[in-house]
Image (cartoon, rainbow, N blue to C red):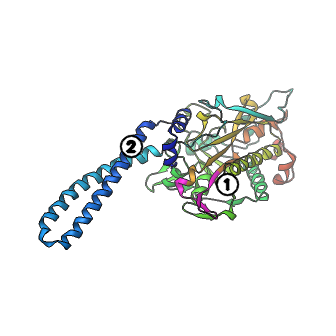
């Protein structure tokens, strides 16, 4: 969890972060518990020391044996009571400490929702078409790319099944992103999709994110909503050498999210689904804000490069405090233009955590002087099927055919267009 010494020294900074990140935590309650916990810990240590001294005296002064044993029992009774009090206070202290957020970086915009995010730049040109545009549902149906009815019969709401060209298109997008990042030196990882609660806690998805996770109660495991969870927590309790950093990974996984809180929103189509595929960038770097910032913008640049290769118009926004997660210190979203929604919509999220995750998971590195906690970062490379929405809609032609950008053609047999005859 966060460094308690920093919290004690600058409670106002954390108080402000709690307010702007909208975290359900009363900091004064936590600080009072911290003081009580320290007092009880000191009292417990003192009582144990007294009891140990009496035990030594029993052997050294046999004439006072009964008196010393009686005193020891009295102290033991008080010690048992104080230890019970300490355990109770310590449990509540740890519960509240888990809610203390990471401090946002200087310059992060303050706000409550994604409506308060600040646009940084727009890239690409939105096509002005002289025909009635089809949405991704109609285009996917025309090409027999997706089966909603069958999937929902099998799995219920928000289910889908890609078919035929839909499968090939998704795999082409995934492979383009993977190959690009491998050329950049990222190590491919297919991490566990089922993880322990500690992995979800350690990466900051618990507490507060339990409602969005699928739990397998019988096995005490959770399905992950991003490969970041598995990739980062795989390195729990490890210590790297400074010379090994930065370590850059590209995680490949199926992801699962319950989409709690989105009832009635985006129930049709491919925008908000329970299961999806994702290529995720994950970085461990040294405990240095300048280095972390450099890695953050490298991750962002990788995602932008991929969207430019896919010839998709997008914008980058600085995410406000109220739209950030518990551990995020700096966050940018990339929103790709979706004609049917008449809006730029989130397709990528780039996040810096500093040492929030590494403290929870015990991931360190050793330099010449000491051990330090690594800084962690992550960003989407490609997530499907959401990326299929802007891809199909932005590359459509009047007859319903889909243009294939040059960079993607090698992954689709060299074709430059998908026609209905391909289905």
Q: Is residue 128 above or below residue 373?
A: above
Q: Is residue 21 above or below residue 296?
A: above
Q: Is residue 367 above or below residue 264?
A: below
What's the residue at 47%, 36% (across, down)?
A: 24
Question: Which residue corresponds to mark 1?
Answer: 283
Q: Is residue 253 magenta?
A: no
Tag 1 and tag 2, C-beta contact below 8 Å:
no
Earlier in the chain: of badge 1 and badge 2, it is 2
Q: Judge by depth and name the residue closer to the eye, 61 or 230.
A: 61
Crowd tier of the residue under label 2, counting other residues whose Cα lies within 10 Å: few below 14, some 14–19, many 20 or above: some
CA–CA distance in space, label 1 to label 2: 35 Å
Q: Is residue 366 magenta?
A: yes
Identify the disc placed on residue 33.
2
Asked where in the image residue 250 lies, by quadrant, the reply is bottom right
Asked where in the image residue 238 lies, by quadrant, the reply is bottom right
Q: Judge by depth and name the residue closer to the eye, 4 or 149.
A: 4
The answer, for residue 142, to whether it is visible in the render is no
Q: Which residues are magenta?
A: 359-376
Q: Position of residue 89 (x, y in %)?
A: 35, 47
Select label 1 or label 2 by which is in front.
2
Asked where in the image residue 240 lies, by quadrant, the reply is bottom right
Q: Judge by depth and name the residue closer to the eye, 64 or 222.
A: 64
Q: Position of residue 245 (x, y in %)?
A: 68, 60
Say which element carries label 1: strand
Circle count? 2
Identify the disc placed on residue 259.
none
Crowd tier of the residue under label 1, counting other residues whose Cα lies within 10 Å: few below 14, some 14–19, many 20 or above: many
The answer, for residue 229, to whether it is visible in the render is yes
Direction from residue 348 to residue 259 in the image, left or right:
left
């Amino acid at each position: 969890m966060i460094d308690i010494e920093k919290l004690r020294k600058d409670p106002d900074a954390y108080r402000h972060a709690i307010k702007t990140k909208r975290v359900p935590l009363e900091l004064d309650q936590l600080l009072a518990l911290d003081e009580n916990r320290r007092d009880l810990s000191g009292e417990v240590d003192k009582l144990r020391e007294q009891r140990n001294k009496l035990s030594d005296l029993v052997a050294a002064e046999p004439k006072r044996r009964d008196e010393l044993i009686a005193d020891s029992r009295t102290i033991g009774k008080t010690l048992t009571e104080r230890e019970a009090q300490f355990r109770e206070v310590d449990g509540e202290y740890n519960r509240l400490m888990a809610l203390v957020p990471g401090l946002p970086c200087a310059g992060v915009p303050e706000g409550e929702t994604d409506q308060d995010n600040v646009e940084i730049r727009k890239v690409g040109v939105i096509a002005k078409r002289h025909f009635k545009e089809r949405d991704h549902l109609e285009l996917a149906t025309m090409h027999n790319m997706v089966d909603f009815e069958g999937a929902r019969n099998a799995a219920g709401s928000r289910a889908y099944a890609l078919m035929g060209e839909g499968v090939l298109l998704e795999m082409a997008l995934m492979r383009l992103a993977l190959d690009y990042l491998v050329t950049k030196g990222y190590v491919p990882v297919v991490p566990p999709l089922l993880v322990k609660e500690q992995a979800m806690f350690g990466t900051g998805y618990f507490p507060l994110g339990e409602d969005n996770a699928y739990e397998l109660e019988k096995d005490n495991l959770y399905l992950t909503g991003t490969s970041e969870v598995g990739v980062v927590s795989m390195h729990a309790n490890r210590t790297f050498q400074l010379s090994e950093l930065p370590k850059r990974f590209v995680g490949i996984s199926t992801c699962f999210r319950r989409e709690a809180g989105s009832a009635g929103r985006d129930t049709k189509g491919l925008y908000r689904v329970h299961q999806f595929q994702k290529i995720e960038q994950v970085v461990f770097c040294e405990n240095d804000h300048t280095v972390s910032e450099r890695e953050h913008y490298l991750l962002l640049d990788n995602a932008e490069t991929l969207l430019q290769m896919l010839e998709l118009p997008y914008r980058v926004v600085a995410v406000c405090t109220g739209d950030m997660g518990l551990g995020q210190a700096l966050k940018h979203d990339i929103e790709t233009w979706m004609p049917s929604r008449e809006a730029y919509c989130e397709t990528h999220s780039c996040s810096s955590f500093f040492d929030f995750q590494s403290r929870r998971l015990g991931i360190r590195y050793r330099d010449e002087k000491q051990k330090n906690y690594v800084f962690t970062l992550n960003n989407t490379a490609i997530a499907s099927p959401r990326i299929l929405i802007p891809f199909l809609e932005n590359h459509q032609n009047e007859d319903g055919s889909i243009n294939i950008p040059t960079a993607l053609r090698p992954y689709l047999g060299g074709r430059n267009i998908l026609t209905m005859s391909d289905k």
